[in-house]
Amino acid sequence: MIGRLQLCGASSDLDDILVPEAGSRAPAFCGHSVVWPWLQEHINRPGLEVLEIGSRLVVARALWKEYLPDVQYTGFDYLPGPNMDVVGDAHRLSQYLPGRQFDFVFSCAVFEHLVCPWLVVEEISKVLRPGGKAFIETHFSFSEHEAPWHFFQFNSRALEQLFHPRLGFRVIDSGLSSPIVGRFAKGSQGYLLDQPVNNLYGYSEIVVEKVGPADPAFSWRDVAQDLAATSSYPPPVASVSDTQ
């Protein structure tokens, strides 16, 4: 126990100093694990068509069986295994599910392993019926895993840009959960050594609704221009030399 404390430290109220935005960045209801009661209340309906992307059981149990027992479930994954129905590449999702439309699509700890996650979002738009919802949980700050196919980390703002309005989506909830306390370790450059790393979170989540068809003229090359029309990059902070 002492060795673990020396290595990792122990959680305390001092953690709030290193994660000061934890309250404001947390999602309203779709945080890690706590989203399932919300899904049970709003999604668990007899006959509802539900698709899970990345359904193969790796380390966790199939939570949908506990919280969504009444739905018509389809499990989709790149590799065969337990708790799946269709084997395929999510970047071409609609090709494996011709004519299928779903009321709810969800994916947990998968988007970090997608080489082109924006293409998978386009595919979700194709298979999600109007009024349908999607829930995505992925990582913002987390250990590399299942390498070499671990490509991205996302904050919630990144997920909001992926589920772009011009693809027919409206964001219902998003945020970051499971705060992490970090520091630069031995082997870092001297000026970084032992310095804290603030505002780290293990998980990034989003819930969206399909409110309309995708714009056929949509291009990912336009996203930066669309973003600049509604927000701006923070202005530079004056340095000491600037004020002298």
Image (cartoon, grey):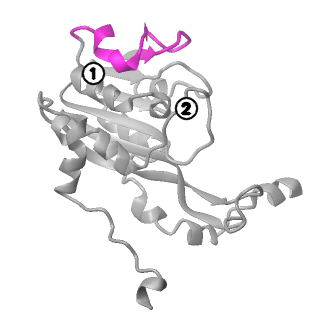
Return the x and y of residue 162 as percentages of the image width and height: 31, 39
* Marker disc for residue 150: 2
Q: In which quarter of the image is the C terminus?
A: bottom left
Q: Is residue 16 left or right of residue 51?
A: right
> Which residue is more in the foreground, 192 or 35?
192
Q: In which quadrant will I find the N terminus?
A: bottom right
Query: Does the CB distance between marks 2 and 1 fall below 8 Å?
Result: no
Q: Can the viewer see residue 168 in this picture?
A: no
Nearer to us: label 2 or label 1: 2
Q: Evaluate whether residue 187 shows in this view.
A: yes
Q: Residues within 10 Å of mark 1 (few under 14, many from 20)?
A: some
Of the pair 71 and 131, the residue shown nearer to us:
131
Residue found 63% across the figure and 71% down from its top: 13
Q: How far apart are marks 2 and 1 (CA)?
A: 32 Å
Is 33 on the left or on the right of 43, as rendered? Answer: right
Magenta span of residues: 75-99
Residue 82 in the magenta stretch? The answer is yes
Residue at (51, 34) in percent of width and height:
151
Identified at 12% across, 27% down, the residue is 216
- Give neighbour class at mark 2: few <14, some 14-19, many 20+ (Cα, 10 Å): some
Residue 38, position as x, y percentages in the image? 37, 41
Tell me if 110 is positioned left or right of 148 in this view: left
Tag 2, which secondary structure? loop
In front here: 38 or 126? 126
- Judged from this view, the residue extending furthest toward the right is 2
Q: Which quadrant of the view contains residue 149?
A: top right
Position of 139 with respect to 53 (left or right) is right
Secondary structure, mark 1, is: loop
Q: What residue type is labelled 1?
A: Leu
The residue under label 1 is 48
Considering only vertical position in the picture, is 111 above or below 12? above
